[in-house]
Image: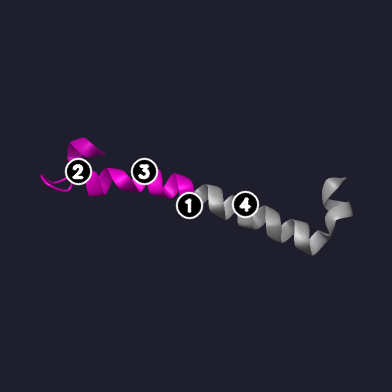
Amino acid sequence: MAEHAPQGKRGLYTSFIQTTATLGLFLSLLVILGCRLSLGTEAFEV
């Protein structure tokens, strides 16, 4: 990604790699929390 970024914008372009990985982690945690709350603790643990 850095090789194809415009001069002076390499930091901005490569920061999206780390940002999207973190956002994916938080999104998956929200999905798990939503499933746990909607199913109930007992059904989730089975």
Mark 3 highlights which residue?
A: 17
Marks 3 and 4 sit apart, C-alpha to C-alpha, by: 19 Å
> Mark 4 or mark 3, which is nearer the start of the sequence?
3
Q: Which residue type carries mark 1?
A: Leu
Callout 1 secondary element: helix
Image position of 25 (left or right of 44) = left
Q: Residues within 10 Å of mark 3 (few under 14, many from 20)?
A: few
Rendering quarter of residue 2:
top left
Residue 11 x/y as whole percent: 23, 44
**Farthest residue in the bottom direction?**
38
Callout 2 secondary element: helix
Marks 1 and 2 sit apart, C-alpha to C-alpha, by: 20 Å
Identify the image quadrant of the N terminus. Answer: top left
Mark 1 highlights which residue?
A: 23
Q: Which residue type carries mark 2?
A: Arg
Marks 3 and 2 sit apart, C-alpha to C-alpha, by: 12 Å
> Mark 1 or mark 3, which is nearer the start of the sequence?
3
The residue at 19%/43% (across/down) is 10
Q: Which mark is residue 35?
A: none
- Over which residues does the magenta segment extend? 1-23
Residue 40 x/y as whole percent: 84, 59
Callout 4 secondary element: helix
Q: Which residue type carries mark 3?
A: Ile
> Mark 4 or mark 2, which is nearer the start of the sequence?
2
Mark 4 highlights which residue?
A: 29
Mark 2 highlights which residue?
A: 10
Secondary structure character of the magenta stretch overall: helix
Q: Residues within 10 Å of mark 1 (few under 14, many from 20)?
A: few
> Mark 1 or mark 4, which is nearer the start of the sequence?
1
